[in-house]
Image (spheres, grey):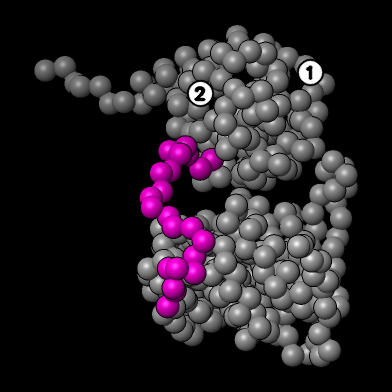
Amino acid sequence: MTTLAKAVPPEDLSQYKGIMVYLDSFNDQLTRAAIEMIGVGRKMGDKSGEKVIGVVIGSQVQSMVKEAGYYGCDEVYGFQSPEFKMYRSKPFTDILAGTVFEKKPNILVVPGTKNGRDLAARTAVRVRSGLTADCMEIDIEPDTGILIARRPDYGDSTMSEIRCEKHRPQMATSRPGTFDLPSKNPKREFKTEIRDVKVDKNSLKEQILSFIPKGEEDITASKVIVAGGLGLGRPEGIDLIRQLAKELGGSIGVSRPIADLGWVPHDFQVGQTGKIVRPDLYVAVGISGKPQHIVGMMDSKVIVSINKDSNAEIFKYSDYVIVGDLYEVIPKLIQVIKKKKKAAVPQPSPS
């Protein structure tokens, strides 16, 4: 039988202090999303004067604990067990919720990865608090310690501000790629504590025998992305943008309709319901510029758009625009890039 768990406000809010960051990891290495959230926590800590507390779980956590401190945590608590090489829902929830009960943080932020979303939801229920998911902005009121969490709503047409004034910890997640990475300082001083956790294998409902990665690239880490939309017109257009991306040394991306059509996996989808990216160069090919897509790439350093519609909405967000048929424009761009590359290669001098 399923029962509902109601959020329960604590009697004394003053007991809750500090900003806790759950540090998502894979193969005992911090994910980019985890480092992003350290930066978010550090900014709130500097603004409010509260310490930043990192929590990391893995099979060997020592190096991750150090990394977390270098990136901005004031205190880092590591929990390790051979069973924690991969994410495990129940023991990870037990540890994070237990650490919340022990440390009583004012705020808990969790990377919005697949594992992070699962853990955040489970932890929110366990500690009887609320959770604001997929935030595009996370901030704090320094005088009150109130978390300001903003996320798109109503088909991304509005930005809602969510406040959790009566419950603790105040919780939020954010999609990977939403925030810049903080700077790393190996000379930072911070407190660490590593605990060995004994896990009864018989208590685990499942056993992980092996992990087979998809082998697909993480476009959130790409410096150059060439993305295609419905303007591609046919699946062969993917091959064309892939050629351009290869010449530019980048990755491909797509808008949601293309992913929904199955032309490429959803891992390459850019937008509010896909990946949030911020490359040095974003080339939008045949993309109209709906808000759901714009929110996923608007922080790119340089945006180039190619579209035959001179009134395409995406042009408003672009640094450079090319009005024309993409099937004529892109082959010419590829030729120019190849010529530039060839010209840049030193030619042997005649003997």
Task: Check disc 1 and give the amino acid type.
Answer: Ser
Expressed as whole percent of the image width and height from the top left, the position of residue 197 reads 44, 78
Q: Quadrant of the N terminus?
A: bottom right
With 14 as the anchor, is 198 left or right in this view?
left
User: Mark 2 and mark 1 in contact (Cβ < 8 Å)?
Assistant: no
Q: Which residue is mark 2?
A: 242
Q: Position of residue 93 (x, y in %)?
A: 60, 69
| Crowd band around label 1 with a 10 angstrom C-alpha radius: few (<14), some (14–19), many (20+) | few
Secondary structure mainly formed by the magenta segment? loop
Q: Is residue 294 magenta?
A: no
| Tag 1 residue | 310
Task: List the single residue furthest toward the front.
Answer: 1
What segment is highlighted magenta in the picture?
198-219
| Mark 2 nearby-residue class (10 Å; few <14, some 14–19, many ≥20) | some
Q: Residue most toward the left?
A: 351
Q: Is residue 192 in view? A: yes
Residue 105 against residue 179 in the figure, above or below: below
Q: Report the residue at 64% width, 79% height from top.
A: 100
* Residue 58 in the image: above or below residue 117: below
At a point 83% along the width and 71% down the height, the residue shown is 6
Foreground pick, 199 / 26: 199
C-alpha span from label 1 to label 2: 24 Å
Residue 187: x and y, percent? 43, 77
Mark 2: secondary structure: helix
Instruction: Give the vertical position of 26 relative to 345 (above or below).
Output: below
SS for callout 1: loop
